Image (spheres, rainbow, N blue to C red):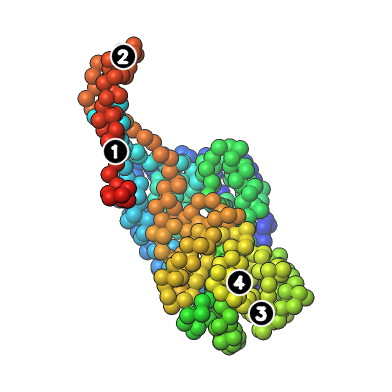
Amino acid sequence: MTQPHTLTAGIAVDNPATGAVIDHVEEASAADVAQAVARARRAQHGWARLSPRARARLFARARLWLLSHRQEVVDTIVAENGKAAEDAIVEVVYGVTAFAYWAKKAPRLLGNARVRTLSPLVLGRRMYTRRVPVGVVGIIGPWNNPLINSFGDAIPALAAGNAVVLKPSEYTPMTALLMEKMTRECGWPDGVFQVVTGAGETGRALVDTADFIMFTGSTKTGRAVAARAGERLVPCSLELGGKDALIVLADANIERAVNLAVHGALVNGGQMCTSVERVYVEAAVYDAFVNRLREQFAQVADVGAMTFPPQLSTVTEHVDDAARRGARVLHGGHAGAGPGRFFEPTLLVDVDHSMACMREETFGPTLPVMKVANAEEAVRLANDSPYGLQATIAGSDTGRARRLAEQLEVGCVTINDVQSNYMALGLPMGGWKESGLGVRHGAEGIRKYTKLQAVSVNRFPLSRDLHMLPFNPANYRFILNLVKAIHGRRPFFGKKGTR
């Protein structure tokens, strides 16, 4: 499906930091995708029959390959994505950790689960559920994290016994191709992991053929993926847009809160679905927070380039719109002048919800900060969004922060922390509202790649059960009396009806 890196035609892949074309990849047709899925389906049967220990050994080889080839992986990510090398190292750390985590946890998370019942009609049965791989998982990855959000989703899918066909973003396909090379060099079965490169038509072909779709990208495209998956009656999981809020409470450690804001907003050039894209600060500490934040912005040197060419225009439009509506630019505010796609780290104040920077996903190195009267106003404004992926609260009283977290309409809240939850593979990560469907990570992050089968075994079968045809009134009177004996007693709630 993939070609050696000597193509001189097809899709050009450029380095966002320099504008230079670094390679070309082919654009897989619908027929190419169908063939890849067919190969994956053949390979999946043998892969699923491997013991968890055998798959764990193959995962261990890949984990060691990533560590020994870490510089090659980092260089590839930096070249096609334009991010800082330190951000690329985080992707390698994620991959190594994910191989170890899912190899260890998959057998327990996917094991048979015993089921008990109180119904007298099924007394004596042994009942359990078992999880079966869905088959071929099609993954459509984004450009902002070529390893974490593309190949990273393949790891639990493979651990669950599925084969995977990955279509990376056409802007960052080289890391996925390197991962395909890794699986070959580690002796993985042929066809169990494949990469198909291409743009929208290639992705649509994968949605039309795979047994499960894992998509990370825009809400607009996610709706189309969900609609097509629904037509085919195949499951899908979607991680879509975000507009994550940071709430700074009056009792917050200001230095910690500032560092949360700077890192959350600027890491990977702000091109993260979990980037801090707006800040609400209680009035009592607003001036101190903004003054220190301005100092920190001035110290940030390298946040990487803008990977997706149209994103540079979006960031510019949001900053210009805010300025026209009365916001002040305390730092940055302009695109870079060189050949690469860069935008200055930009700090905005005097913002409100009439501005695009507070309501629409910016996905760039900007941070708008708004003063609020109290925490209740901050929560209300944070919830005033179609997105619900993640949020952060900074405050010394963690009990109060936890109570506020429970009022936020998001899939994950970090308190006095930012984005580190993504590296906690046991913790589910998924969005509410227009931020997606389903989760990655945690128990459901691997179980979603399985089908559930229920099994009921009658260990002591009689020739005929009491409830079977032809009906016998006496038998049903006995059944009713048995139900009354089991369930007919009044519950005990303690004195005066209290529990």
Q: Are marks 2 and 4 in contact (CB under 8 Å)?
A: no
Locate residue 154, reporting x and y percent.
47, 53
Which residue type carries mark 4? Arg
The CA distance from mark 3 to mark 1 is: 62 Å
The CA distance from mark 4 to mark 3 is: 10 Å
From the image, state whether disc 3 or disc 1 is nearer to you: 1
Say if 421 sits above or below 116 in the image. Answer: below
Which type of secondary structure does the marked residue at label 2 adopt?
helix
Which residue type carries mark 3? Val
Q: Which residue is mark 1?
A: 490
- The picture quadrant where one finds residue 6 is bottom right
Q: Earlier in the sequence, mark 2 or mark 4?
A: 4
Locate residue 393, reporting x and y percent.
50, 71
Q: Which residue is mark 4?
A: 278
Q: Residue at x 35, y 39 (%)?
A: 130
Q: Are marks 2 and 1 in contact (CB under 8 Å)?
A: no
Q: Earlier in the sequence, mark 2 or mark 1?
A: 2
Say if 79 sits above or below 201 in the image. Answer: below
- The picture quadrant where one finds residue 314 is bottom right
Which type of secondary structure does the marked residue at label 4 adopt?
strand
Q: Which residue is mark 3?
A: 349
Which type of secondary structure does the marked residue at label 1 adopt?
loop
Q: Earlier in the sequence, mark 2 or mark 3?
A: 3
Q: Earlier in the sequence, mark 3 or mark 1?
A: 3
